[in-house]
Amino acid sequence: MSVEKARFKYVNYLWDEAEAASLDGDDVALLLYRSNLMGADLRLTNYGGGNTSCKTEAVDPLTGKTVEVMWIKGSGGDIGTLKRDGLSALYLDRLRNLENIYQGVDREDEMVELFNHCIYDLRSKAPSIDTPLHSFLPFKHIDHLHPDAAIAIAAAKDGKQITKDLFKGTIGWVDWQRPGFDLGLKLRQCLDENPGIRGIMLGSHGLFTWGDTAYESYLNTLEVVETCAVYLEEHYGKKSPIFGGEKIKSPEKTRREKQAALLAPVLRGLCSTEKQMIGHFTDASPVLEFINSNDLERLAPLGTSCPDHFLRTKISPLVLDLSPEEDLSGPGWLKERLMPAFAAYRAKYADYYRQHKKKDSPVIRDTNPVIILYPGIGLFSFSKDKQTARVAAEFYINAINVIKGAEAISEYTALPAQEAFDIEYWLLEEAKLQRMPKPKALSGRIALITGSAGGIGKAIARKFAEEGAVVVVSDNDAQRLISADREFGQSFGKDAYITAELDVTSGDDIQNAFQKAALAFGGVDLIVNCAGLSISKPIEEHTDHDWDLLYDVLVKGQFKVTQAGVNIMRKQDMGGDILNIVSKNALVSGPNNAGYGSAKAAQLHLSRLNAAELGHDKIRVNVVNPDAVIAESKIWEGEWAVGRAKAYGIRVEDLPAFYARRTLLDEIILPEDIANACLAFTGGLLNKSTGNVLNVDGGIAPAFVR
């Protein structure tokens, strides 16, 4: 371990001298390197939080003269993944000259558009609201981060004095103020009044640190945050037990996850009254320490302090009045019991909006909670997609850490409600929301596809993920599942999917898959029964084992998966879709096909029966009938292809062309064709269609349903 690395216990020293040396002379590359290192340590900053910058000399393309340019993280970026195209590059003198036309705090939002007149690199990302906070400080390299340890001091009642004493006057202090042009001037004033300081603490907000080089800025940031963390650690439990001590104990993890999985679909339904939400669950140790404490009731309603926190989490969470040992198996009474708490939360949020709105405030947003705390069990978060829900949970854990630290050294103070409202309903934030891309066809929906590690099932899972759904990729083939996991991770990222080993003949596997879906995403909306197998034999060669296997997988498996899925859909009370991938063989008689064809016919009629029964739940049940989908199909790897070729008197390699020639359209059917049919049923255009069959077989007249 290097000497520098050994100095730090509570933050990660990641600087690699050789890698940094390879970037020497390119300050922008070093800015990105420094930013990525700090963004990789969530103890230094949270996702999307903070800004980093550097000032360089460059040639003005219009005058040929050397000018000073400031490079800074652009609006909406994340320093952990920041690349050059995520930076804004602006003429520094133009930024500073904006002070000459600045008309005061009441007009400072107007300054943001003027940043565009200062852009040096026309490929720049849109400048962020924090741009002037960096431009009015003279330092070449600046870090503005949101470390939990620093914000704990910044949000403490005595934070200003603690900062002065802890750093012996080398860290300045600026009281809470909404980010913007005026705060940039306040930072400059603080520096003028305290020459020689190494950083500035922003009340209830975060930390500014700097250096003459990228490395000096990086090291300075780590040292300041480490000092804050050490100070907090020395005080935990000294003044009083953390969060007032433990009030309740959590059951063991398996029990917590079972409770969370039972509850999540009910919560998701209650949180989705305005738009369909995706959930996230965590029982991380900081969460359990907070929700099991004596002080939960006092501290949770105070809300968060750092703007980054409550912009993601709403100002405060909903705390459930449920025992960790409660029997949650009945959806009806559970929803009835929770509805008053949700109604009260919505009413309180509406009152918060009415009391603090201004003439130009945006209209009220979704009044449902984002963060829900279940004492003894864990934290649920709900938002428009998985990443936003997960990040909201991470931000609330940041807030828990801040509250814990502030309470240990002094007393936690949240932002005044008006200040919080002015951030949450800031017109600049609203403009950012309005620029967001429109939701995709399946945004906000959770899909579980059986047999989806290959062939048709994988094509459906990919199509659904491309259209915005989060998917549970499930299969009974562990090796295929590993390969699919790798593929989906590279294509969509960790927030778009999970995998589950699922043999549809196993009740335990089915329950486990749906539990994983509930824990990862909050429930399920869309089930595709795609798992299958084929056995092609003459009637005299069919065995009892062949028959039972076909019916266990195709018919009973479809039924059992549907049964488990419907249980969750009813808890959510948002309707849903069940798609059954059946076959042309459900309608057409062929040779050597008694077991498979009759099982497919049973699947088809079971679909009709389910559609008739589930309509009052707004659960649609529809069928897609493929034929001869050979590409990537596991069915065709075994004896089925040999059996079908034998039945038609042709060679195995001639099957694709044979099947295409017998269709009306003379087309080979691909897995993607079946996936497109599934999207047609679920993408919003056929919401009033149930009990239907869509043939995707190139046109086979005997398979026409009508």
Image (cartoon, helix red, strand yellow):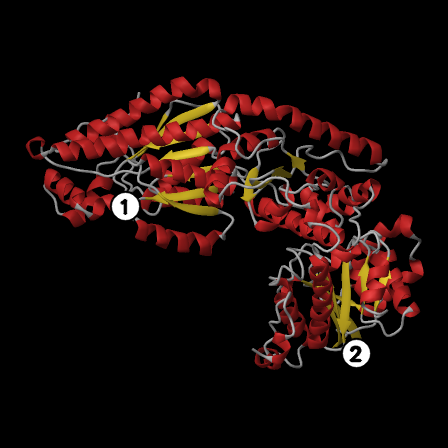
Relative to the observer, which residue lies in front, 441 or 358?
358
Asked if 51 appears above or below 530 in the picture, the reply is: below
Which of label 2 and label 1 is nearer to you? 1
Q: Give the residue number, with chain letter if any, for mark 1.
A: 633
Residue beneath the point at 45% across and 56% down: 490
Residue 703: % across, % down: 26, 27
**Quadrant in the picture for the N terminus:** bottom right
Residue beneath the point at 59% across and 79% down: 2
Residue beneath the point at 72% across and 45% down: 310
Q: Is residue 426 left or right of residue 104?
A: left
Query: Crowdedness of circle 2 by 10 Å Cα count: few (<14), some, many (20+)?
Result: few
Residue 4: % across, % down: 64, 77
Relative to the observer, which residue lies in front, 73 or 678?
73
Asked if 346 appears above or below 196 in the picture, the reply is: above
Q: In this view, does 221 lie to the left or right of 183?
A: left
Question: From where the camera sits, is residue 701 visible?
Answer: no
User: In the rendered structure, are the residues bearing label 2 and label 1 in contact, judged by CB atoms less than 8 Å apart?
Assistant: no
Asked where in the image residue 7 lies, by quadrant, the reply is: bottom right
The label number, if any, that marks residue 66 in the structure image: 2
Asked where in the image residue 28 lies, by quadrant, the reply is: bottom right
From mark 2 to mark 1, how far is it between C-alphas?
Answer: 63 Å
Q: Is mark 2 on a helix, strand or loop?
A: strand
Amino acid at the residue labelled 1: Ser
Residue 31: % across, % down: 67, 71
Extreme-left residue of the structure: 540
Q: Is residue 221 left or right of residue 584?
A: right
